[in-house]
Image (spheres, rainbow, N blue to C red):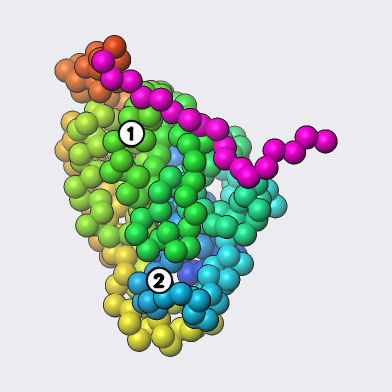
Amino acid sequence: MSSNLLKVALAQISPVWLNKEKTITKIKNSIQDAAKQQCELIVFGEALLPGYPFWLALTGGAEWNTKVNKELHAHYTRNAIQIEAGELDDICQLAAENNIAIYLGIIERAQNRGGHSLYCSLVYVDQKGKIQSIHRKLQPTYDERLTWAPGDGNGLQVHPLKEFTVGGLNCWENWMPLPRTALYGLGENLHIAVWPGSDHNTKDITRFIARESRSFVISVSSLMSREDFPKNTPHIEQLLEKAPEVMANGGSCIAGPDGEWIIEPVLHKEGLIVHTIDFNRVYEERQNFDAVGHYSRPDVTKLMVNRERQQIIEVKD
């Protein structure tokens, strides 16, 4: 395929909720399916591995020192991903074997922050199977703060992929002007926005970012319904008592650099959404507007970005 063309797969799937081993199996199956269709990039939703903390809205998550919330958090922590322990190695190997890049939303149990706190992280694996960036969500949203820790700027990075320069943000980070601008300034022209699910998140911001940045924007959401709660989930009866039938309806979509839909939000459908995008469209739309190029005024406004990985200790032996 020509260097200006990129075949992408949007993996709109549900997790095996809070079960990292079984969810990894689903992820690997999706990668293999995308590879069979000669896709060069596959994107998964926010926190897919091992799942979004839906219980917080169903259990009175802000109630202090309750057994139900403590036990669910412990279960979540046990199923979170410790990258340093090699828990993404099989996924990286599949990327290398199939020459496919991957954006994957995970819950990270970060070793360099003690190994017990959780981060909503977006991991980029290149086509050679190497993890190139791990972006920890800068600011968890609303009740997410009860289970996720705030991240840092280390993952505000972009990556070459054929003629494209790709970067990504988690969920409502996409509404934050400065992190978006940081990626634009690094040369991003293919923006990845990952979400836990639902078109109410993707239907406006996807097109807005595309029009603002004159880039392609791929939004990928997950699915989640009552039947996706495993029966062995702690306090499952209490969760089902208050859970709506559908918690995440998908809404994965693609907007072009003119801000118009290429693929409108897809609802209630599990599987791969595959499309080929053409880099030439970026050049066409940058002709009249470029937010960090000829339409910027760095002599008047300029952004400073701190990409230092934050950690509590610095050890000198």
Q: Main secondary structure of the magenta part?
A: loop
At horizontal 52% and vertical 36% (from top left) the residue drawn is: 154
Q: Which mark is residue 199?
A: none
For residue 189, which quarter of the picture?
top left
At horizontal 66% and vertical 53% (from top left) the residue drawn is: 114
Against 75, residue 91 (above or below) is: above
At horizontal 40% and vertical 39% (from top left) the residue drawn is: 168
Q: Label 2 amino acid?
A: Ala
**Apparent side of residue 263 relative to residue 78 in the rendered image (left or right):** left
Q: Nearer the viewer, mark 2 or mark 1?
A: 2
Image x and y of residue 238, in percent: 41, 85
**Apparent side of residue 179 relative to residue 263 in the rendered image (left or right):** right
Image x and y of residue 252, in percent: 30, 52
Q: Which residues are magenta?
A: 300-317
For the N terminus, the quadrant is: top left
For residue 296, which quarter of the picture?
top left
Mark 1 crowd level (few <14, some 14–19, many ≥20, 10 Å Cα): some
**Residue that label 2 marks:** 62
**Apparent side of residue 141 relative to residue 307 in the rendered image (left or right):** left
**Residue that label 1 marks:** 178
For the C terminus, the quadrant is: top right
